[in-house]
Each structure stands twice: as C-alpha cells, then as structure tokens.
Amino acid sequence: MNSKRTMTLNLTDQEMKVLEELSTQKDLSKTAILRQALRLYQLVDVRLAEGGKLFFEDQKKEKAELMVL
Amino acid sequence: MRVPIQIVECATSRPVEAELFDEVTVEHFLETQKEWRPVVLAAAKQLAQSGAPGQILPRHFHWDWSSKEGELQVLAFSFFGITCNAKLQGLMKLDLTGRAGRLPSQKGKPVVYVDYSETAPWNIKALMQALGSGQQYAVVGTRLIEAAVRKSIEEGFKGRVALHSLSGSERFYLEVCGMTEVVRDPTKQNLLWCEFTPEQAEKFLAGGAA
C-alpha cells in the first residue's frame, strides 16, 4: 500500500451535504468519494488531452451533451 | 508495493515463493509480448488444428499490454504483477472508477473492475497440453483476484469486485473464486458479468470459496 498524506479540506454546508449524500448512496466513506472524484477528474483530463471527447447521452439517445473541463 | 506470496509448482505440487507487486512498468508489458504471446499463439494454432472445442481456444491471443503504457500513470487504473523464478507469471489491470455493481443488492455501489487479467501461458494447463508440455505454476490467477479484492477493500469498496469473464474462464471465476453469475452483457461481446459481494469477497479471501 502506498503511504498517504493528510490534508484539511474546507467545504461549504451545501458541499458537505452533497458529499454526505453521495457517501450514503455509494456506501463509501467521504474520503473514498473524494479520491474517486480525483481519479475521475484526472482520467477525463488525460482522455481530453489525448483528443477524446466526453458526452452524456439521454435515454432516448437523441441528445448528447459535450463536457469540457 | 512488493509482497511475498506463494504459488504452487505443478511438477512437485509444493508451494513456492513468488512476489506480488504493483510497480508495473512498460518493461513488463514488453515481456508479455516477447515471452508470452508467441507461446499463446503457438498453442492456439495447435488447438485449432486439432479441432479442440471452442471454449478451450484462448480468446486472448491478440492482447497487447504495451498499448496500456499511457495508463500506467493514471490514478483510475491500477496494475499488478506476479514474478517467480525471475519471470513474469501473471499480470492484471484494474479499473477503480466509474463501475458499479449490477446485483440488485449492490446496484450503484462502486466495484473494482478487473479489466484484464492474464497468467503466463506456461501456467495454463490446456495451452501446455496442446504444446505437449506441462503446466509450470498454479493459483497465479487466484492470487491476482485476491489482490483485486484487497485493492477493493483498500479503496473503501468493501471487497466488491466485478469483471467480464472470457468464456474459457467462467468456471474459474464462478466455481473456484465463488463469484456470482450476474448477466451476459450484449455491449461486451455477450461476455458474462461476474461479481463479488462484500460477503463473497471475504469468504474468498478466507480461502472458503473453492
């Protein structure tokens, strides 16, 4: 296991509420949620830098939304 | 991370010392292309010529680990390898983000997804038999799946692991590892989606699945 470093994170009430909701929904600790967010952010950033595109498609597959970070 | 583990030498049926590591480099990928792929291809040709049933034919003969070089530095992925006797015996790529359980009780909960897992061809009995040789080491695949479960626990996923099984490996994941057969996935060549619940993962790590 890689060694870990500690940091303090200041969140607004609303941000903390969302973090707590996600933590409950996903059955993950708040720390694990934030680590997931970092991994996802880096992955999307790498893919976009490689020339990839990120789309969200609605259920009818009629409308696609391009995401740019 | 480098930890000592044991695998089984088939010639003597005795455990031997091996090493599990996550510091996988492009050199390991090149080793698979140089040392593994020619053996897999030779065995596949031999099996096809002998009219072996389709499920025995290796479906991974075209895999190229070196295409994953760019993913080595991406946090969303994790790679594990096993060495023994100065040779690479197994390699695995895990996807740590964006995959959720499909079992009703696990729906929406994150899983560690085993994207690729391969053991060296000399550790696959059917391939070695096709080439008129014997299998060298056993339980390499099991040790890799154990590493996936431990990674899942480390990530806070409580041991949840999922994968799409190649047809020739379904028995291993379901009967040996004790994963649950969930659904055939039409978006992934109809491969079988198999999953560990936290309880199954715990049982597997305790050695009770087989």
Image: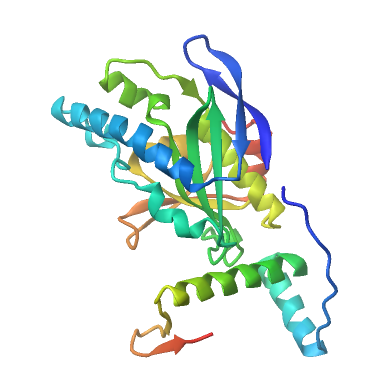
Name the residue rendered at 54%, 31% in the picture.
B83
Residue B51: x percent and y percent?
Answer: 15, 28
Name the residue rendered at 48%, 35% in the picture.
B90
Which residue of the protein is positioned furthest toward the front in this rendering?
B27
Q: Is residue A45 left or right of residue B44?
A: right
Quadrant of the rendered image containing residue B147: top right
Which of A39/B175 is in front?
A39
Quadrant of the rendered image containing residue B49: top left
Q: In this view, does A32 lie above or below B64?
A: below
Residue B195: x percent and y percent?
Answer: 52, 50
Name the residue rendered at 64%, 67% in the picture.
A36
Q: In this view, does B182 lie above or below A22?
A: above
Quadrant of the rendered image containing residue B155: bottom right
Name the residue rendered at 30%, 56% in the picture.
B189
Q: Is residue B194 above or below residue B187?
A: above
Look at the image and tell me whether residue B37 can be seen: yes
Which of B23/B92 is in front?
B23
Q: In this view, does B199 lie to the left or right of B7?
A: right
Residue B30: x percent and y percent?
Answer: 41, 42
Residue B201: x percent and y percent?
Answer: 63, 44
Where, quadrant-wise, is the N terminus of chain B in this rendering?
Answer: top right
Where, quadrant-wise, is the C terminus of chain B in this rendering?
Answer: top right
Which residue of the protein is positioned furthest toward the top in this rendering?
B12
